[in-house]
Image (cartoon, rainbow, N blue to C red):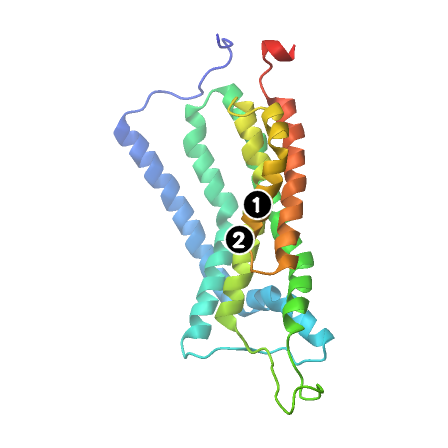
Amino acid sequence: MARDENDVIDDKPMPLLEHLTELRRRLLWSGVGFIIAFLVCYHFSFQIYSFIARPLVEVMKSRGQTPTLIYTQLYEAFFTYIKVSVYAAFFVSFPLISSQLWLFIAPGLYRSEKKALLPFIAATPVLFLAGAALAYYFIFPVAFSFFLSFQTPTAHPAADGMQIELMARVSDYLGLVMKLVFAFGVAFELPVALTLMGKVGIIRSKTLKKYRRYAYVGCFVIAAILTPPDVLTQTGLAVPLALLYEISIISVRLVEPKLDEDV
């Protein structure tokens, strides 16, 4: 297919050494931005962790419990704050890192390719945040209430003086929460991935419709792999995935190349 004469690459030929120098400069800016963000986030690491722990805290308060998280090793709390700072720093510095990556790649793209990619680049962080927000504000309260329901107070008729009570470790809680946030965030990128594949002609909307029932099964399998082994959390991820698959069918239909059979 012939290209439009105005669809050109806005760049000049560069030797390999200059490309490597440009890559080094972009990586340096990204690294400096991440380090600065990390130092700032570490200063506020307790506040950030408190925000992450709020869903569990609210559930425990609603059950009349004193919110308590423990650590069982001397260095556990310190390294937990380090991990919190790393996660938060990546989130804060992501706009800078992605912009540096774009500035390195964009000069080698045609104008039409830039216009085609920009909507997907803009939608990626939005959908990730939507998935993370769904997990934080809706899934966590329900899942934590379910897990805490297995505690047994001493006043229980069958307890016979025995008490089963949650004593959550700070590192375990952070690992569980970040795993779920990442799982929901990445899962919400499904429309971006499928739409981009549809735009370049790898898949068709008719194919997505044909294999819809298998896709639904796949949504529940993926949810079972990425989430804890409870029905509530798995359903909370599988159902949005199925809805996003349906949205993907519509978006692929809008952007896919028109074939003779479609005309």
Look at the picture and state if 131 lies above or below 167: above
Q: Residues within 10 Å of mark 1 (few under 14, many from 20)?
A: many
State the image coordinates of residue 66 (x, y, percent, origin top left): 66, 81
Look at the picture and state if 48 lies above or below 36: below
Q: Secondary structure at mark 1?
A: helix
Residue 185 visible somewhere in the drawing: no
Q: Residue at x 65, y 41 (%)?
A: 242
The residue that disc 2 covers is 226
Front residue of 128 and 19: 128
Mark 2 or 1, nearer chain start? 1
> Mark 2–mark 1 contact, CB under 8 Å?
yes
Cα–Cα gap, marks 2 and 1: 10 Å
State the image coordinates of residue 132 (x, y, percent, origin top left): 61, 52
Q: Secondary structure at mark 2?
A: helix
In the picture as drawn, the residue positioned furthest to the bottom comes out as: 161
The residue that disc 1 covers is 187
Front residue of 92 and 56: 56
State the image coordinates of residue 62 (x, y, percent, origin top left): 73, 74
Residue 124 visible somewhere in the drawing: yes
Q: Amino acid at mark 2?
A: Leu
Circle 2 or circle 1, nearest the eye: 2
Q: Residue at x 65, y 87 (%)?
A: 159
Left or right for 189, reference 62: left
Q: Residues within 10 Å of mark 2 (few under 14, many from 20)?
A: some
Quarter the C terminus occupies: top right
Q: Amino acid at mark 1?
A: Ala
State the image coordinates of residue 207 (x, y, percent, origin top left): 59, 26
